[in-house]
Amino acid sequence: MRCCLNVQVGLQRLAELVIIFCMSLKTQEKLNVHPCQRCGACCAAFRVSFWRSELSSGGSWQVPLEAVEDSGGSLVSLKGTTQHNPGCDSLKGRVGDQVTCQIYENRPSPCRNFKASYEEGYREERCDLARSKHGLRPLTKQDWKVFRSPSRPVSLE
């Protein structure tokens, strides 16, 4: 009887270790993702308006027509960002967990120019504000050290 009990305790401990191992793999997976791809708060915190000319920039990128709505005059806005509680329609996923921008390669200048806190070594107030609106802590230098480990590239793409 005692032998069976020891085996049962051993199997229970093994199951606990497997769960801990799987949780650490999930944590490691999240660490190997660009901090912005674990956030998306900026896409769900601000109005994103830009010049209509970005719809046909003729350059290497062009904002898709289906992603915008008219803002009057020479301006357009990304759909979903003009609401009282903005949320870009091109953002897929859950803010603060895992997100993807459906128009990333063709995003407008306000998105291209938005910087995450400490991405370039200094705090960005608007990033911190967006994150706080969604109950997320501000990014720190440490968030970037983990992402930019020697085995990781520094690129978003």
Image (cartoon, rainbow, N blue to C red):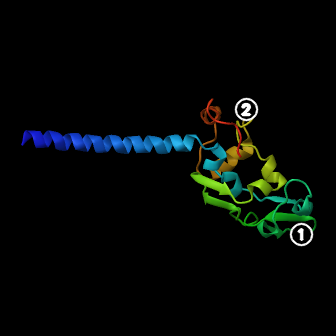
The quarter of the image holding the N terminus is top left
Q: In this view, does 97 lie to the left or right of 41?
A: left
- Which residue is rendered at x = 64% and y = 40% of the image? 139
Q: Where is residue 49 in the image (x, y as percent from the top left)?
A: 83, 60
Q: Position of residue 71 (x, y in %)?
A: 85, 68
Q: In this view, does 136 lie to the left or right of 89?
A: left
Q: What element carries label 2?
A: loop
Q: In terms of depth relative to the viewer, which is nearer, 85 or 22?
A: 22
Residue occupied by mark 1: 72
Residue occupied by mark 2: 121
Q: Can residue 107 be seen in this view?
A: no
Closer to the chain start, of discs 2 and 1, is 1
Asked if 97 appears above or below 139 in the picture, the reply is below
Q: In terms of depth relative to the viewer, which is nearer, 40 or 28?
A: 28
Q: Position of residue 36 (x, y in %)?
A: 66, 47
Q: Mark on residue 9?
A: none
Residue 90 in which image quadrant: bottom right
Give the amino acid type for the residue marked by disc 1 in the picture. Answer: Gly
Crowding at dot 1, Cα within 10 Å, few <14 / some 14-19 / many 20+, comes out as few
Residue 152 in which image quadrant: top right
Q: In this view, does 83 lie to the left or right of 11?
A: right
Q: Is residue 5 visible?
A: yes
- Which residue is rendered at x = 82% and y = 68% of the image? 65
Distance (Cα) linking label 2 and label 1: 37 Å
Instruction: Give the label, 2 or 1, closer to the camera.
Output: 2
- Which residue is rendered at x = 65% and y = 35% of the image? 144
Q: In terms of depth relative to the viewer, which is nearer, 155 or 43?
A: 155
Q: Are marks 2 and 1 in contact (CB under 8 Å)?
A: no
Give the amino acid type for the residue marked by disc 2 in the picture. Answer: Gly
